[in-house]
Amino acid sequence: MGMTAPQRTGSFVVLAALAALRALAGQPAAVGDKTLVAWVTAADLAQRGGSVLTIERRGGVFDAIVLGELAPGKWMPGSNFYARTEKQQDAFPAEAADAQTLVQIAIAYKATQIDVYRNGKPYASYAVKAAERFGPDSFVLLGLRHLDARPDGRFFTGSIEDARLYNTALDAAAIAALKPNEPSDPKPLAWWSFEDGKASDLMGRFPSSTLVGDARVAGGRLHLDRKGAYMMASKDTPDTGQAAADLANVNAAARALREKLLSDPFRPGYHFVTPEGSCMPFDPNGAFYWKGRYHLFYIFQDARGHNWGHVSSTDLFHWRHHPTGLTAGMFSGNCFINKDGRPTMCYHQVGQGNAMAVALDDELNTWKKLDTNPITPRTEPGDPHHGKYRSWDPYGWLEGDTYYAIFGGERPGIAKAPDLGGPWKYVGDLMANAVEGVGIHEDVSCADFFKLGNRHMLLCISHRLGARYYLGEWKNEAFHPTFHEKMSWADNSFFAPESLLDDRGRRIMWAWVFDGPGFKTRGDFGWSGTMSLPRVLSLGDDGVLLMDVPPEIERLRYNPKKRADLAVAAEGEVPLDDLRGNSLELAVEMNGKGARQFGVKVCCSPKGEEQTLVFYDAAERKLKVDTRQSSLADSPKGIEAGPFALKEGEPLRLRVFVDKSVVEVFANGRQAVMRRVYPSRDDSLGVSLFAVGGPAAVTKLEAWDLMPSNPY
């Protein structure tokens, strides 16, 4: 939807207020123009894609000094999706220095101009379309290209004598004048000299340093002797200075932000959303039912890095925010009960590996990360499990007296231990066999593993395939899958599923609903982070997965309407003039024997210029949501289609939920599809019935407005 001038002015007010807040908190300004400099030795010139020095911010955006990723032996500016990387590198000289020779590599970024220097001399120069800025939540990596890089070719092996980050673009003369382990003018923003056996930032910009794998500091250098070794440097929790803050300004900023979010026409009202900020990622994590309440954790980012926000509810729709007790490097994970009866998080600690944390109170506000973290088993060459598994996206549980954990990734593994603190040992591969349509080593991330009926279910994602699940049997310390199906088809916009088991024995899941980098929500209103509706999962008598929205949503209903015995002619459309809105639930029962497609249209403008189609495709046997006409403006357009077949004589029973920019659909309790929509017209609120290729009959239709459950 186009923004009026007053709306744009409002956004400047919010941004100015938030800038004032950041100033009060003492947060440093973002880094735009910059120079990355390092003096290094490369152990092997055939290595591909490792980074000597990386600056990265949330969402996987990074700039780096990378060796050999696109062309063997050649230095290059690495970046997310090669956004600031010159792919044509024929003119780049290949490195020839041996493993004992120190080489200075520098990359200067001045607006859209990038210049690379080797030993103070020009090496490469080119322009890019757009530059990036790195705010106070950014971190630095030495030895690893970026945190989410694929396992092959992401580590640099060799040594680093000196590494620096300047918040200005140095010219050739300034770079040539630099000497390792000696101060410079201008001063660097961050500087690691590794003198006195320390890995600390001499400038204090990134005061927390972690050595991962076999990374070590000795002889005035950072040694990265093998793959898996790297260093991560980040900020500690900043001193906010709140005691000295002007509360009038703080309150004004908070009110302005709330008003801004409330003015967003696309912000969902009853799908859980982030209370503020752009959360990339926004994975649901640690979902857990504890002492009468549903607890849900979600990833958000600030100066501390990735943290887990925490909310709880008694009805799955009205959520109370808790203090943030799990901070600084929290990535995907789950919650389970340990031998002492305490809630325990098994999660991925950024820069360290898979880890555990135990709740210290029943509100689940205070947690203790284990001193024995990480739980990654130690292996040596010759061990049959050495180098097979990645310490990534875990799922932990207690079975009898044994703790188990899935280690996710392209070849997921199983580890076990007698106690939380270990010793942890690999058991072997998670997957005992392959199933039709998916490789045995397909990426298993965001793993969630549980008993469902008389089967075991592995709920997960693949970064290639999106959300998906397996059904099978857990036996002999391995999973034997017999069935696999996806939960998103057109793209990965239904992502990172997470579930819990409640006191009624219900398995309830959520997923992160993408809005995407180019979509309007994120760009226009400064926030990103939406969950799907909770889904209750179960198995039917025939072993088919069933899914539906929990009945608690009925408490949000008001303004009920009913219709019955409506006829829809072939190629016809029946507008429902008394049904309008963008916060709706529709329950429709239809028969379309002979029709090729039949269903409902929502978010319709009066003349149909904008409309979103929800229907059963009898020819293809699929449940579909068609967003190709959802907006006259630039927005995601396409068809999401999940496999779904009506049985002989079975009516189509649709539950359609419209929540501003989310359309989520359930059919006959055994399939669900979801899309984001961004109508550009204020009057795209209509609902109609339609049929193609034959007539359809609506036996009954119920509709309700749904009260938003989010506070704003």
Image (cartoon, rainbow, N blue to C red):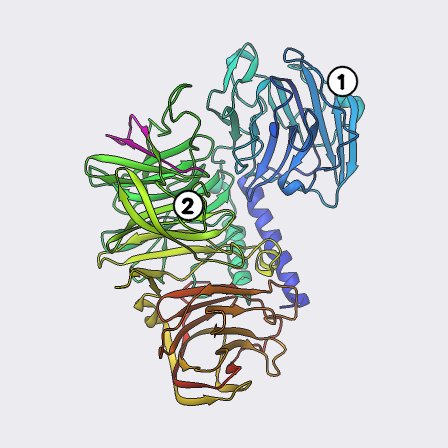
Please tell me whether mark 2 sits on a helix, a strand or a loop.
strand
Q: Position of residue 596 (x, y in %)?
A: 50, 78
Please tell me whether mark 1 sits on a helix, a strand or a loop.
helix
Q: Which mark is residue 446?
A: 2
Asked if 521 appears above or below 427 in the picture, the reply is below
Q: Visible in this render: residue 645? A: yes
Quarter of the view holding residue 155 = top right
Magenta span includes 424: yes
- Asked whether, in this view, residue 410 is left or right of residue 36, the answer is left
Task: Please state, as top left, top right, bottom left or bottom right, where the N terminus lies in the image.
Answer: bottom right
Whether tag 1 and tag 2 are in contact, CB under 8 A, the answer is: no
Which residues fall within the magenta stretch? 411-426
- Asked whether, in this view, residue 196 is left or right of residue 478, the answer is right
Q: Amino acid at mark 1?
A: Ala
Q: Amino acid at mark 2?
A: Cys
Q: Determine which residue is flagged by label 1.
A: 177
Magenta span includes 476: no
Query: Which numbered disc, 1 or 2, marks the residue that appears first in the sequence?
Result: 1
Q: Position of residue 120 (x, y in %)?
A: 77, 20
Q: Position of residue 550 (x, y in %)?
A: 32, 65
| Residue pictured at 23% horizontal, 41% vertical | 342
Foreground mark, 1 or 2? 2
How crowded pointer 1 is (Cα within 10 Å; few <14, some 14-19, many 20+) is rated as few
Judging depth in this view, the residue of 566 and 101 nearest the camera is 566
| Residue pictured at 46% horizontal, 69% vertical | 623
